[in-house]
Amino acid sequence: MTKESKIFVAGHRGLVGSAILRRLEADGFVNLVTRTRDELDLRDQTAVSRFFEKERPEYVFLAAAKVGGILANSTYPADFIRDNLQIQTNVIDAAYRSGSKKLLFLGSSCIYPKHAPQPMKEEYLLTGPLEPTNEWYAIAKIAGIKMAQAYRRQYGFNAISLMPTNLYGPGDNFDLETSHVIPALIRKFHEAKVEGKPHVVIWGTGKPRREFLHVDDLADAAVFLMQKYEEEEFVNVGIGKDVSIYELAKLIREVVGYEGQIRFDLSKPDGTPRKLLDVSRLNALGWRAKISLRDGLRKTYQWYIRQDDVR
């Protein structure tokens, strides 16, 4: 992948896609192709085929997806499985048929069984039942991994897959109904501070443990692997450390500068007890995360309060 290579970043306005685009621009790649959802609906097979036939990108970062937290996954299961299957099927097939040299598919650590041994190695995929609250999204992402592998085996298409851990950073979704845990907590603590509320309520017990990777680190890993990795097996991308939701909440409370209490709503689900990726395969390839959780949260909060609709 040279500085002049034609590169399509699918989903460039999302959390992951925007970070990949920033990284490519910072690294001096000059022939970048993007389309907004209004310009190209990736769920539309005919439109996607026409786009690839016209543009013929050499490299494709498939970062487009319908994503959300526990509430969104539980409320819209049909949307999550349908939209993600359509997007990845259309893009992978069209990239192959139009002659793209390489495609990078981005999955999610929720593909692993709910009670997978920790930390989770790549070979634990499909060894047990999924977490029920996000199985629709997970099944779609597993299908994407298998489709990339199948196109490699049958057609020799150079498709690789990355499985990032929980992501956060600038450009995240801070809507409390559809967001993941970090942006939701940042918004809750910020609003509580501004409004002088005495406490903030968090879903569940606070005991589940999660690993969090700043999206700029993921973008760095994605560009690294697009240039260095050529194998069928997918690669976990994470930091290799986890924290409890309660520990995370206390850290975000500190970053935001909120001095009230943290309370737990035990009627709400916890989700998977623990999600920590084994990143030894990625580390062996020569890549490690650089941004600490505290620094990443501070940068994300600073980005959030700069937005026009945040007071």
Image (spheres, rainbow, N blue to C red):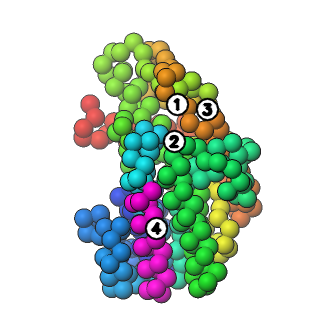
Q: Which residues are magenta?
A: 81-99
Mark 3 and mark 1 lie on one chain; the one further toward the N terminus is 3
- Residue 105's place in the image compared with 302, above or below, is below
Marks 3 and 2, Cα distance to the nearest angstrom? Answer: 14 Å
Residue receiving disc 4 = 88
Mark 3 and mark 4 lie on one chain; the one further toward the N terminus is 4
Res 55 visible = no
Mark 3 and mark 2 lie on one chain; the one further toward the N terminus is 2
Res 14 visible = yes
* Residue 179 location, quadrant: top left
Toward the top, the furthest residue is 198
Residue receiving disc 1 = 269
Contact between labelled residues 1 and 2, with CB atoms less than 8 Å apart: yes
Residue drawn at point x = 36 percent, y = 21 percent: 192
Q: Identify which amino acid the numbered label 4 is placed on.
A: Gln
Mark 2 and mark 4 lie on one chain; the one further toward the N terminus is 4
Foreground of the two, 231 or 33: 231
Q: Identify which amino acid the numbered label 3 is placed on.
A: Pro
- Residue 18's place in the image compared with 214, above or below, is below
Residue receiving disc 3 = 208
Residue receiving disc 2 = 133
Question: In terms of secondary structure, where does tag 2 sit?
Answer: helix
